[in-house]
Amino acid sequence: MGNDSRSKVFHTGWKHHLKGMEIISIDNTFPNSYNGSIWAAWENRIKKGRDNEEKILSEFIEKSKNENFPDDWYSEDYYRLSRITKSMYAALIVSMWAELEFFFKGLIRICSEYLKNGVSDDKLHKACVIKDYFKKVGIKLDEIKELNTVNAIRILNNAFKHNNGSYELNKKNPCDNINEELCEKWYIDARNVEIDYSRIPINELVLACNTFCCELINKVESTLEKRAQQD
């Protein structure tokens, strides 16, 4: 393929692929409204299931008042319901990080193809690799709004999958720490204490992801546009 042909492919191809990423990861996955999103539907199911089971348990307790069951009989049932709810919220956040990983990998593949500076897919699960790649193409993730929240989603995902749902401050690698303000806001104890995932505001995470993804995709577009003008 000649230089002219290669230039035409560059000028048109990346815009098409970037638009596809925008539709998938922003319009469909992290829209600018929580209501109507897949995350709102997921959370509504969690809440309805929890409320229904609590109602059934309360009705059973009311009917069993004269049965002289031990007090801890019911507390165990409530504890079980609470554990299920927390785990379902954790699973929601794990899924949210999976979508963010898909977004990062998609943008890196687009940049790699058109800037000819790729990175191996098997390394893209590492935050430092993702951050270093974008820095290499001229994009500083630290300057993008809501990075703290996106990073927190990653850490919450890792805590649930690899540390029994507990969070502990990482003194060696600050990148693996949740922002202190978010810890306080979400009632997260950094002393290797189990996280109550049901207290984390999913609606705020969705809107933060929308802000972050929109800004990052705009920066990628600007970077590729500059390259296109140079060719």
Image (cartoon, rainbow, N blue to C red):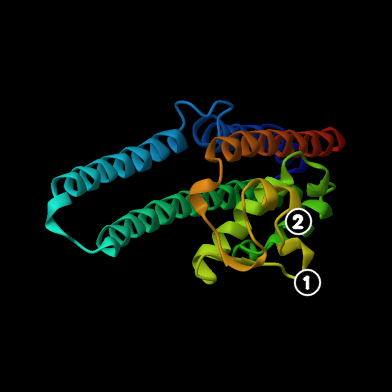
Residue 163, percent from left and from top: 54, 71
For the residues labelled 2 and 1, the Cα–Cα distance comes to 20 Å
Seen at 57% across and 64% down, the residue is: 158
Of residues 80 and 2, which is closer to you in this image? 80
**Residue 19 drawn above or below residue 95:** above
Image location of residue 183, percent across then percent down: 68, 53
- Please name whichever residue, 230 or 163, is drawn nearer the observer in this view of the structure: 163
The three-letter code of the residue at mark 1 reads Lys
Task: Give the labeled residue for mark 2.
Answer: 131
SS for dot 1: loop
| Residue pictured at 38% horizontal, 35% vertical | 44
To which residue does mark 1 refer? 171
Q: Which mark is residue 212?
A: none
- Earlier in the chain: of badge 2 and badge 1, it is 2
Residue sitting at x 45%, y 34%? 40
Q: Foreground: 180 or 130?
A: 180
Q: Secondary structure at mark 2?
A: helix
Relative side of 116 to 199, left or right: right
| Residue 205 coordinates in the image, percent (x, y) | 59, 40
